[in-house]
Amino acid sequence: MKSIVPRSIAIVSIVTAMLSCSHKNQDQLFIADVSKPRQVALDEIATDFRIIPLDESEGLVPSFAFAKLYGDRLFLHNQSKGTVTVFDNGDYLGTLKAVGRSNNEYVIAYASSYLPSREEILIYDIISKQIKAYHVPDMTWTRTIPMEDCGDYLNGFEAIDEDHSFYFGMHGAYVWDHRTKSISLEIPMTDIQADVSWAGDQTQVCEPGASSLTVGIAGYTTYVLKVEADKYSVIDSVAFNPQTFNEDFWKGELTEEKSETAQAAMLANKVALGCRAINYNGNDKAFWYFTAQGEVAEETGNNEGAKDWNLYIYKGGSGQAISRLTIAGSDYALQPNVHDSRQWGSIIELPLPEDGSKTGRIFKQMEELADKGYEHALLLYSVL
């Protein structure tokens, strides 16, 4: 049988490490079917929204690998160029670009974070295995944090406080104490007999000012953790299609049969492969998850890197899955690339294409911004 999905996608990239310790949550939400999301208009689901025009007078909004929002400060990280562009409430602050091999530079800006208490951008250099810190907004180097002794391949990290960061690597998730240059907390993971390329998604969404981490295993349970310097606790958990794979499926050796079973489920869009940014409001909750693009794989024979983001909203005891949004008459794939503690969003280009209705409160604001000469805006919205 020819593998339609590359092994790096079917096994490595989608299998996120699951907690080996037994954490049960009485309020765990079970998602029985993730394969039937629908398209809706943003006006139908958004309880509120915010549009922030981006001032591009001193620099264009770049293409970016990922974006992070800390309060009013927006950070756009371009891995290929080694830059981080910073906006404050839409005003352009500057662009960090310190690529080089001196002590104050980095070779490859693989991952980044922001420490509000010190107003520092933290860059993880995958070549030197160091974190380089730069002050905002002047972008001057402030310090270097060694990471050579962590003994793992960092796939990402997030600052917790001035002395601690948590990171995930090939072997699990940890909190690193920069003072002692050692691990202060290890988050236990299941023993999966395969390389795990990423062990979760790090956000700052569960509680204002608190770091959080989601870990889980494809098709089973995602745990949302609150992570501190010396402890962690389970905030919530979501089970995706538990009937597709049981908890024991991923234990032991990862066989070719298991691989083919996982691929078949992916191509049928029956399994959620990841989850991020869970928002809460009483008993209601909403979160992103993604599935493989089965249709693309069937047509091309290869879906490497392809995925569909979906938004799940659980309110009043029932839920709905959303795959695409209509914003001011235009159809958009979901882009959960920007989020804060209570809202999600994406950077949109102005003006919007004129391929539908121009009515609605969102379009009116976008049209006014376009008339003022803005080319891009940050759209944030809440669904709870």
Image (cartoon, rainbow, N blue to C red):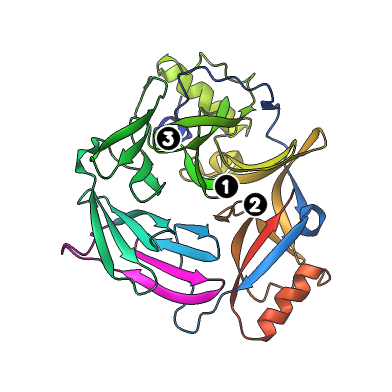
Pointers 2 and 1 in contact (CB under 8 A)? yes
Name the residue at 43% across, 31% down: 231
Residue where numbered disc 2 is placed: 342
Q: CA distance from mark 3 to mark 2?
A: 24 Å
Pointers 3 and 2 in contact (CB under 8 A)? no
Where residue 341 appears, as percent x and y from the top left, is 60, 51
Q: Crowding near pointer 3: few (<14 within 10 Å), some, many (20+)?
A: many
Q: Judging from the image, what secondary structure is the residue with disc 3 in?
A: loop
Name the residue at 53% across, 29% down: 218
Mark 3: which amino acid? Ala
Q: Crowding near pointer 2: few (<14 within 10 Å), some, many (20+)?
A: many
Q: CA distance from mark 2 to mark 1?
A: 7 Å
Q: CA distance from mark 3 to mark 1?
A: 18 Å
Q: Judging from the image, what secondary structure is the residue with disc 2 in?
A: loop
Which span of residues is magenta-colored? 79-108
Residue where numbered disc 3 is placed: 199
